[in-house]
Image (cartoon, rainbow, N blue to C red):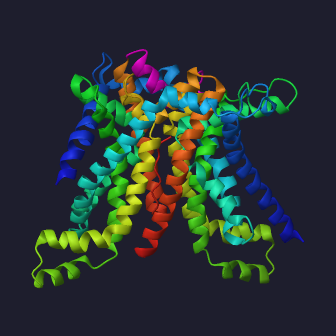
Amino acid sequence: MPLLIFSIAFLALPLVRLFLASGESEAGWTIYLDILRKPRYLNTLILTVLVSLATTFAALAVSTTAGMFLSRNRFKGRGILLSIMTLPLAFPGVVIGFLIILLGGRQGLINQITPGHVVFAYSVIGLFLGYLYFSIPRVLLTVMAAAEKLDPVLEEAARTLGASPFRVVIDVILPGLMPSLVAAGAIAFATAMGAFGTAFTLATNIDVIPMVIYTEFTLSANIAMAAALSIVLGIVTWALLLIARSLSGTTVAAGG
Amino acid sequence: MIKSKTKILQLTVTLTACAFLFVPIILSVLAGVTANYFQGISSGFTLKWVFRVWELYADSIFLSMRLAFSCLIMTLIIGLPAAYGLARNPGWLSRLLEEFISLPLAVPGLALALALLQLYGSMKGFRTSWTFILVGHVLYTMPFMVRSILAVLASIDLKTLEEGAATLGASPWQRFRDIVVPNAMPGILAGALTVVTLSIGEFNLTWMLHTPYLKTLPVGLADSYASMRLEVASAYTLVFFVLIVPLLMAMQWASARAQRISQ
């Protein structure tokens, strides 16, 4: 099969080569320990995980609220809101980075309409907003697909039995959505971990894993470390998306 | 009235999220057609920035279109027979192959690009040609094509249909052409639109694989964000939106249709 030949030549062999390259420096295979031992890499790892976690929870909160609202209510303009919220699906990370600059850069909207000097595009907040922009549509689609399958009769029943709206959300809606929420969260987290395009435009002074891989490779020519970080990052995102898929059966491209 | 209070909260969150997603898009469109964005809209509207983008980046737009079209042809030539093969022989081996070709969905493009560079970077003729970028795009979009076709084929009784045709004397090629392809059409259409949309917007792999003489549309975008004035960068983004938004809408329509058929 041509597919088999293509994927062996351009997928399997390059990945094996990448793995071998990670052990070719003086450090040998202990390079993987260096990621945890050297403060530069460890701090990068911690920061990336923290920003990704923040993105995941923010995207889940926003998209679950909006997703439940849009799937439970029929009103004029619903279609438009839904299109707006899924429009960014096809935007590459670089474009999203630029959109954040238009919001929070030096010539950005926020800086113009507020007194004083408010520029946040190139800080961790800007990066977080960029990742959030990227994740909201993806999480929303997963949540809405699950919300359509929830049985509204269960909520009615809970309400007739005297449950407060808060209890209905906690006891009926959230447990029903849980597998999809975990799946959507895993997708958001993996996407944020590997997002290169957004980081490329915004994180010029922030060390997140994709940026460090890029600078190690192009500026420091530290190919072994770039390869080792890529392998670790690849395994983490792959494992997360495998969990996501086994829970919800959806596939969303990581990219970014 | 607690119920309506929750509704209002939900609506507020939804509208805020919409504003967060949509306002920057409006800003970028406005900045692309404003004579001087720093002075504001009062400086008047103009198309000169769009023309400037055309002068500067027409090559990159054409390269992206050529790549997307070639990528579509490649994923069809490789993906359609592969999806057919996988649908005809379900089993753990097929599952494994499907999982394997789906790796580029889960592994960040940066890592894949590094892998390709490690293995083929020293082959100068290949490294500097546009087919090197094409390989990256085909790698990334192939799983979408294969899975899209596979989902449709899995929902019909292909075996019975083919056996029926075979008893009537149809050759394997005739069966593939007259039965498999027409039945798979909704999946092929959805897959094709996904492949083109993703290929035109692909940045992560392409940034690592491109050479100074081969800039695709998103690579040109990154370039303009870093080195051009805001109006030019915005006008270029506007050109990108005009290209990608209709494709995205067509893709969503075709995917929903394919999903309905395969259920």
- Which quadrant of the structure image shows residue B170? bottom left
Q: Is residue A249 visible?
A: yes
Of all residues shown, which one is farthest toward the right? B1
Q: Is residue A74 above or below residue A13?
A: below
Q: Nearer the viewer, residue A230 or B236?
A: B236
Q: Nearer the viewer, residue B82 or B42?
A: B42
What residue is at 23 percent from the left and 29 percent from the top? B126
- The x, y position of residue B201, in whole percent, is 47, 42
Q: Is residue A116 above or below residue A3?
A: above
Q: Is residue A206 magenta?
A: yes
- Which quadrant of the structure image shows residue A234? top left
What residue is at 22 percent from the left and 51 percent from the top? A3
- The x, y position of residue A136, in whole percent, is 62, 50
Quadrant for the N terminus of chain A in the image: bottom left
What residue is at 42 percent from the left and 14 percent from the top? A220
Q: Which residues are magenta?
A: A203-221
- The x, y position of residue B6, in whole percent, is 82, 65
Judged left or right of residue A80, residue B213 is: left
